[in-house]
Image (spheres, rainbow, N blue to C red):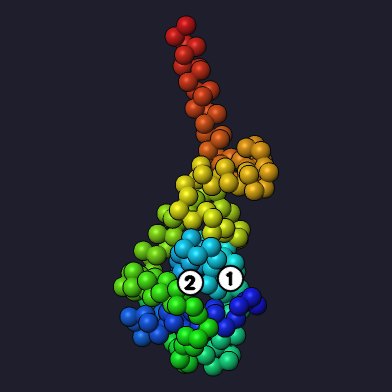
């Protein structure tokens, strides 16, 4: 369960209450929490919720997200609603309790307010795409925890940081990443093709 239950619960209530929509979808809610914690980390040196985030196909998600939402639902803090859409039914949530602002510092409230002001009217797909752009998405494996230090980095910077933190060699990083292995093999093939072409002219 969450390390700081009161803060993550009230952060969720904050976004549900301040959203421009009567209900807020699960995917967009996850992105709002991530951007909030990323901004807080880079502004203050620590996150607001203390949650760990993992990579899933639709972007960063709190590692215990399903457990947090089900616990809040069981405690009567939120209500889950299913909204039919053209693609598939969407899980949305409605706040059943008022936010307890006393659990937050003034700076934390300001950060959450900034995030909701920026993203309130954005579609979920836009937030998903942005989360992919603002992270070195290709070097993070599905299910892997996301370090907030990687936020805003390109793939090359992230690889160097990963090497320094995990004391990995370049070859070890490549071997641990299917995407990098694919790029590496394609590069080898390009080199071989170039050599064959040059050989034909000699």
Please provide percent x and percent y for residue 23. Answer: 39, 83
Q: Quadrant of residue 70?
A: bottom right
Residue 193 sits above or below residue 11 on the image:
above
Residue at the image position 53 percent from the left and 63 percent from the top: 45
Circle 2: is it few (<14), some (14-19), or many (20+) Cα within 10 Å?
many
Residue situated in front as seen by the camera: 52 or 57:
52
The answer to whether residue 190 shows anywhere in this view is: yes
What is the total number of numbered labels drawn onto the structure image?
2
Residue at the image position 44 percent from the left and 87 percent from the top: 94
Q: Quadrant of residue 6?
A: bottom right
Please provide percent x and percent y for residue 162. Answer: 60, 47
Instruction: Please identify the residue farthest to the top as the structure is shown.
Output: 202
Residue at the image position 33 percent from the left and 73 percent from the top: 117
> Left or right: 18 with respect to 108?
left
User: Along the polypeptide, which appears first: circle 2 or circle 1?
Assistant: 2
The reply to whether dot 2 and dot 1 touch (C-beta < 8 Å) is: yes
Q: Which residue is mark 2?
A: 33
Please provide percent x and percent y for residue 8. Answer: 54, 78
Residue situated in front as seen by the camera: 128 or 146:
146
Q: Which residue is mark 1?
A: 51
Please provide percent x and percent y for residue 64. Answer: 61, 73
Element under disc 1: loop
Element under disc 2: helix
The answer to whether residue 56 shows anywhere in this view is: no
Residue at the image position 37 percent from the left and 80 percent from the top: 19
Residue 17 sits above or below residue 174 on the image:
below
């Amino acid at each position: 369960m969450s390390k700081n239950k009161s803060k993550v619960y009230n952060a969720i209530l904050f976004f549900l209450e301040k959203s421009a929509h009567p209900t807020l979808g699960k995917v967009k809610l996850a992105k709002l929490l991530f951007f909030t914690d990323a901004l807080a980390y880079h502004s203050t040196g620590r996150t607001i919720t203390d949650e760990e985030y993992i990579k899933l196909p639709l972007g960063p998600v709190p590692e215990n997200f399903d457990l947090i939402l089900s616990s809040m639902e069981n405690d009567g803090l939120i209500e889950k609603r299913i909204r039919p859409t053209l693609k598939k039914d969407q899980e949305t949530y409605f706040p059943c309790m008022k936010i307890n602002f006393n659990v937050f510092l003034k700076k934390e409230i300001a950060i959450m307010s900034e995030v909701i002001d920026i993203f309130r009217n954005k579609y979920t797909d836009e937030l998903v795409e942005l989360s992919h752009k603002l992270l070195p998405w290709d070097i993070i494996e599905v299910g892997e925890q996301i370090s907030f230090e990687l936020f805003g980095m390109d793939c090359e910077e992230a690889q160097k940081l990963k090497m320094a933190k995990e004391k990995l060699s370049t070859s070890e990083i490549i071997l641990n990443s299917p995407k990098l292995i694919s790029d590496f093999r394609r590069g080898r093939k390009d080199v071989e093709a170039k050599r064959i072409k040059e050989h034909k002219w000699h």
